[in-house]
């Protein structure tokens, strides 16, 4: 069965709102990117593209495209899920790590899981969102960036 891996990282800066997994998170900084910088949605989109052999998110959604400036990344996920369904696949399960020193993601993990389960058409018990810190090490540990990593697999068929 096809398996996809995804990784993304963006700078955390003042003056941007923070979105993770399509959920707005209250914080005094947000992710700097051409789009809204949602690292988790970018990593998931990249994993889906990878599983289907359709290239990577930078090719499909170039950060030089003016039409994608400040784009809501849920659009990338929805369009890519449409391709998954058209090819006769569904997502069976997804595991992820969100790596950030702050904000603490514990209070938001369930909302993010629920949102991802709904967007991907996967039962929530097969969607994992795990929060990690970098123990103060490196740019993420210094609160200058946030990253996400994802593994997912596809199976043939209709959504359950
Ligand atoms: Mg990105």
Image (cartoon, rainbow, N blue to C red):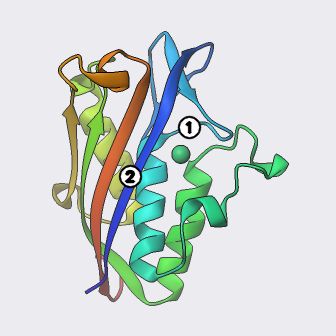
Q: Position of residue 63 (x, y in %)?
A: 70, 49
The quarter holding residue 51 reads bottom left
Q: Residue at x 65, y 66 (%)?
A: 60
**For residue 28, above or below residue 129:** above
Q: Residue at x 36, y 85 (%)?
A: 158
Q: State left or right for residue 12 relative to residue 123.
A: right
- Assign the C terminus to one quadrant of the image: bottom left
Which of pointers 1 and 2 lies earlier in the amino acid sequence?
Answer: 2
Disc 1 target residue: 37
Q: Are marks 1 and 2 in contact (CB under 8 Å)?
A: no
Q: Position of residue 98 (x, y in %)?
A: 29, 38
Q: Secondary structure at mark 1?
A: loop
Answer whether residue 139 is visible to the viewer in this image: yes
Q: Position of residue 84 (x, y in %)?
A: 47, 79
Disc 2 target residue: 7
Answer whether residue 159 is visible to the viewer in this image: no
């Amino acid at each position: 069965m096809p398996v996809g891996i995804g990784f993304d990282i963006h700078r955390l800066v003042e003056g941007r709102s923070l979105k993770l997994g399509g959920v707005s998170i209250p914080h005094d900084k947000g992710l700097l990117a051409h789009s809204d910088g949602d690292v988790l949605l970018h990593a998931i989109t990249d994993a889906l593209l990878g599983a289907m052999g359709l290239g990577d998110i930078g090719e499909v959604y170039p950060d030089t495209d003016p039409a994608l400036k400040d784009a809501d990344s849920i659009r990338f996920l929805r369009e890519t899920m449409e391709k998954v369904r058209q090819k006769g696949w569904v997502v069976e399960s997804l595991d992820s790590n969100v790596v950030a020193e702050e904000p603490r993601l514990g209070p938001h993990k369930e909302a993010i899981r629920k949102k991802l389960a709904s967007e991907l058409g996967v039962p929530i018990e097969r969607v994992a969102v795990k929060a990690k810190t970098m123990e103060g090490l490196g740019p993420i540990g210094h609160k200058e960036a946030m990253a996400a990593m994802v593994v997912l697999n596809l199976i043939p068929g209709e959504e359950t």
